[in-house]
Every structure is written in structure tokens, then in C-alpha cells.
Amino acid sequence: MKKPKSISAVARQEIRFNECDPLGIVWHGNYVKYFEEGREAFGKKYGLDYMDLYVNGYATPIVHLESFFRKTLQYKEVALIECVYRKTDAAKIIFDYTIRKESTGEIVCTGSTTQVFVANGTMQLALVTPEIFINWRKKNNL
């Protein structure tokens, strides 16, 4: 059986002072922001911009998030945030993340997010995949 095509992007993030707790390590809640940085890099690379979806009538709120912490990041370290699209036939977008220390390549955190399509204004859940996303998948051979 053929493995589905995987596409990804990497964002580079220097750890800022305001992201650290009094012990000098990144506060766990900031990893959600790093996942967002990964999604933004992915969107720029593959033409999946939130505003394009919005202009076409959809928002994509996160309905599920997982994160698994393995190491810590500290002030001034650089994190590489890999965002990988996980193919699904359902009307949702799933991304997997791996955050590594740039200096050592060590895995710091892994995780995933699931986003659904809702209609702008009414927030009505789309039960079928919107045409704009179907076209995006075709364009990227997914």
C-alpha cells in the first residue's frame, strides 16, 4: 500500500525573555504559540492562508490540541518548529508538530492540532469539506 504524501514546513524561533518563567525555561503554554508559528510557515509555503479561507466564507478554529514535552527550552535558544500536514478525508485540518533545539537537534516537544471548518458569522460547522480546501489538496497532490 502506498504511503500518503507528506508535506511540511519549518519555522525558526528564538526564545524571547517574556516566554520564560522565573526558572528561565519556556512556560508550557507558549508551545501553543510555537505551533501557530509552524502553521503560519506552512501556510506561507503551501498557499493555505487563514485569510484566504476567511474570504471564502470559513474560519478554522482549533478543536483539539495535544502536546508532549520531552526537554526544556531556555532564553535565547533557537527552536525549529516542523509542521506536517496529516491527510484525512474528513472536513478538518490536522497538523503534527516536532519542536527541536537548533543547536543539538534534540526533540523538545511533539504535538498535534485539529481544526474544523465553520461558516463565518454563524459559526455553523461544515459537515463536508469546503470546495476551497478540496482545491488546495488537489493543487498539492494530496
Image: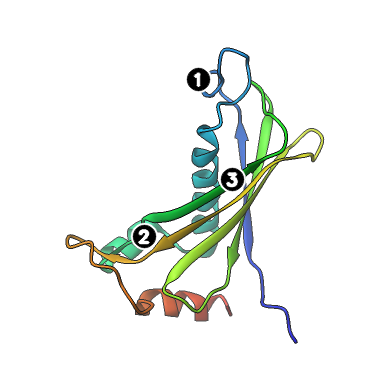
Q: Earlier in the sequence, mark 1 or mark 3?
A: 1
Q: Residues within 10 Å of mark 1 (few under 14, many from 20)?
A: few
Image coordinates of residue 120 in percent, x first then y, are: 22, 62
Say which amino acid is labelled 2.
Answer: Thr
Q: Tell me the residue at 46%/55% (across/down).
A: 64
Q: Residue 99 is drawn in which quadrant?
A: top right
Identify which residue, 120 or 88, lies in the foreground: 88
Q: CA distance from mark 1 to mark 2?
A: 28 Å
Q: Looking at the image, is mark 1 or mark 2 earlier in the sequence? A: 1
- Identify the residue at horizontal 50%, vertical 33% (top origin): 29
Residue 82 pos. (x, y %): 65, 50
Amino acid beneath label 3: Ser
C-alpha distance separating marks 1 and 3: 21 Å
Task: Point out the tag, 2 or 3, that comes first from the N-terminus.
Answer: 2
Image mark for residue 67: 3
Label 2–label 3 contact, CB within 8 A: no
The residue where tag 2 is placed is 60
**Which is nearer the eye, 136 or 121?**
121
Q: Is residue 5 left or right of residue 21?
A: right
